[in-house]
Amino acid sequence: MIKTDVLIIGAGAVGCALARELSKYNIKVTVCDKNDDVGGEASKSNSGLFSTSATMPVGTLECKLRTIAHSMILDVCNKLDVPYIECGSIAPILYPDQLETAKGLTERAFQNGVYDYELLPAKDILDLEPTLNPEILGGIYSPRDRQCNQFIFVSALAENAAENGVEFILDCKVTGMDVSNGKIHAVHTTKGDIEATWVINAAGLHCDEISDMVDECDFKVNPRKGEFYVFSHDTPVKVSHIISSVPSPKTRGVLVIPTVDNNMLVGPTADDVEDKTDVKTTAAGLASIKSQALNMIPGLHFEDTITQFVGVRPARTPEGYDLRFSEKVKGFIGISGVRSTGLTASVAIATYIVHGMKEHGLELERKVGWKQTRKGIARFAEKTNAEKDALIAADPLYGKIVCRCEQVTESEILQAIHRPVGAKTLDAVKRRVRAGMGRCQSGFCGPHVIEIIARELGIPEEDVRKRGEKAFMLDRD
Amino acid sequence: MKDIKCCVVVVGAGPAGMAAAISAKKNGAEKVIIIERENRTGGILKQCIHAGFGLQYFGEELTGPEYAEKFSVLANETGIEFMLNTTALEIKDKTLVCVNTEGIVNIHFGALVLAMGCRERTRANLVIPGSRPAGIYSAGTAQKLINIFGHKVGKEVVILGSGDIGMIMARRLSLGGAKVKAVVEIMPYLAGLVRNKAQCLDDFGIPLMLSHTVVDIIGVDRVEAVTIAPVDENRQPIMEKAETISCDTLLLSVGLIPENELTRSADVALSGITKGAIVNQYKQTDKPYIFACGNVLHVNDLVDHVSHESEDAGKYAALYAAGKLESADELAVEPGDGVRYVCPQKMACVDDNVDLYFRTAAPGRNTTLTISDDSGVLVTKKLIRTTPGTIEKLTIPADKAKNAIGKIVVKAEHKEA
């Protein structure tokens, strides 16, 4: 039996932000997740946006937390060395019926305190973003929408939490709870029982299943599938702002997103599905993204896509954020309804919950020597030649390029594996340092990364996984 | 940071790079360096352990490693300097910036030969829908895992694409005990060489499904099955006729793309068709000090062709570095009816034979190949049959090359489909 003060179920953006927030105090915090890596589900397969609350429903908890988070997030990113770009966003108006909607949105933005959300005439919008369809009727410009590397965001939160004493137990699925007399006596997991004073449900896509274990589930998680294209760095037509759609009967909201890593993301679709594990791209979904995106940016070169993927986001019925301190079960905190806005909102959700825990009688004593910063893995590809030389002088493996497409060195891969809450699979390495994320999609570096992971973890190469428990790269007989 | 000077620097120690370097040396370049990112020479030939190489160039049948070894030995004898475990990062004017575990190395050159080879097209390039499990490999990656690393990739395999590597891997996997259930090709004809179909598919009873493609990939962790559908004349799948084949591995052999990222750093003009540099018969790009050869220039069918072409690149790079390559007026060389592309795309009108390499657009029989300029037909050749999988070569004789006018156009006309 593992004993802890706080058990966080789920190591996505919200779980990791909570872990870091709680790591400031002298209590034992444990995070478990069924995946092999942090940020394993909705927190990885998304567009990495840090958006303002301009278009949020007015007065909701979601809107409030997002507003607060938007003012906090750059401080967190700067302290944790998480890369982001302040690109701003533009929603072009393509159809007359979108004009009314756009006016409504600007009024809502004003109510939400986002005063720099502006409806502009076509010429001004085209001046800002010349790649747009020249026939637009105008557009909304929102300068403070940002894009971050969502993989690094989540792993940086986790890494910093771990450095401050939080224990992460991965490949660890919660299978049930021993609940009686309004108290959780044990949380059963695939890695044994855990006893905790506080149990926080941050399971995202699976939060209904966890809440159900304490009989607190009066909602349903509806998996909503979003397909995306990822574009190569060298595609000739690139946007410099996040291009989003003004909701209209003709469009469901495809975005064209410039990324920190100089790729472009185009998507998502929004299809409600039954199966939370349905990560299949579809011909129809991809075709629909393509036509909607080309309508906004006619010059896009879809032949320059390097991959397509699916993210499943946890929509909730009924809708809305629900951060609940259970009245029935002592110490159980349920977080649900955190949909795509959760990446931004995570840092505010964390402080909100911790505040609530104090209100509920948790006495927190600040930890002496809490490390509030974390330094990211230095990326060879981004350095000047003089800086590269210095990196190699300190660690010669910075001179050994493993992934040619993204120019990722062996040193970076070793750091990804050996840092706290390190990578154990090919996908986890890829998310942290981009080996295999380029144009050849790991065709060249894949065999070498398999070799490095096996060597560093001391396992046979046949046991190296792409991700998860059973996605083995090689034939194991 | 280290600085080195040389006459000719070659990027890549595969068959193209080694042939170019040896030829540069033989043609008077004093100091020739080859940059190679891997720890051994040979490039992709290292993993091509099957035979079939060298019939044209050496007049004997060799395996890939044997073919490469002959060039390695020759390169060493000729005094070529190798920098292994070294990656070229960018070209800045006449300096090649490289990196290895000792740091950044700037190589100041007289001429540079690009010989980086190519990469494989991926699933994403084809936009194949479905899930993203383990067990999807490009044919070359599987070949490396099996032949270099000694692994097994799977037990039941479907191969998409009838390119040469795909067919060779069908045989390799069969020999290794795997069951290759089908080779699926979207086009109505074979993408690779006919001899590979006979030796790699027919001899092993592996079905070739022409005019079919993969429309779905099934499996969460590891591939469990793929769905195959026939395609109509517009290459659109006919979903009503789709069938599912269980397998644990999907191999993709769906084409190669020249690896021209380094080339782009030098702002060299590239061809939209070959995806390689635009060159004249010297394999000289629009940056006169940069030459290109092998699969980074255009994807070849036989390594023997690569060796010949690369010798030209090396020779003229050496002459350029010595200030002996004179520039002449250039004519455009273009594909005409029935031809997909021609390499070179430009021709300097000089008193020397000019070899044109090209691929036809569709397979056919009783084919007439012609090269003409604005004054009329310069060269004609008749062939019993041609396929896009085979590179054709025609030579414009020196006297005609010297006096050519206007535009050079290569055509292929089939009497029968």
Image (spheres, coloured by chain):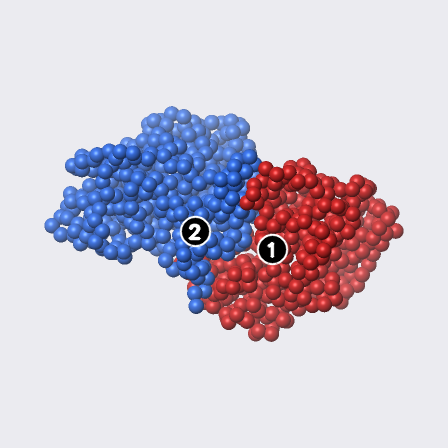
Q: Nearer the viewer, residue A160 or B284?
A: A160
User: How many numbered marks have been drawn onto this rendered protein structure?
Assistant: 2
Q: Which residue is mark 2?
A: A427
Pointer 1 residue:
B40
* Amino acid residing under circle 2: Asp
Circle 1: element type:
loop
Q: Residue at x 83, y 46 (%)?
A: B349
Image location (x, y in percent) of residue B413: 75, 60
Chain letter for the red colouring in the rendering: B
Q: Nearer the viewer, residue B261 or B333?
A: B261
Q: Chain of mark 2?
A: A
On the image, the x and y values in percent for residue B107 come to 65, 41
Which picture quadrant has residue A467? bottom left
- In what element is the residue under mark 2? helix
- The span from disc 1 to disc 2 (Cα, nearest Å) is 28 Å
Q: Nearer the viewer, residue A400 or A80?
A: A400
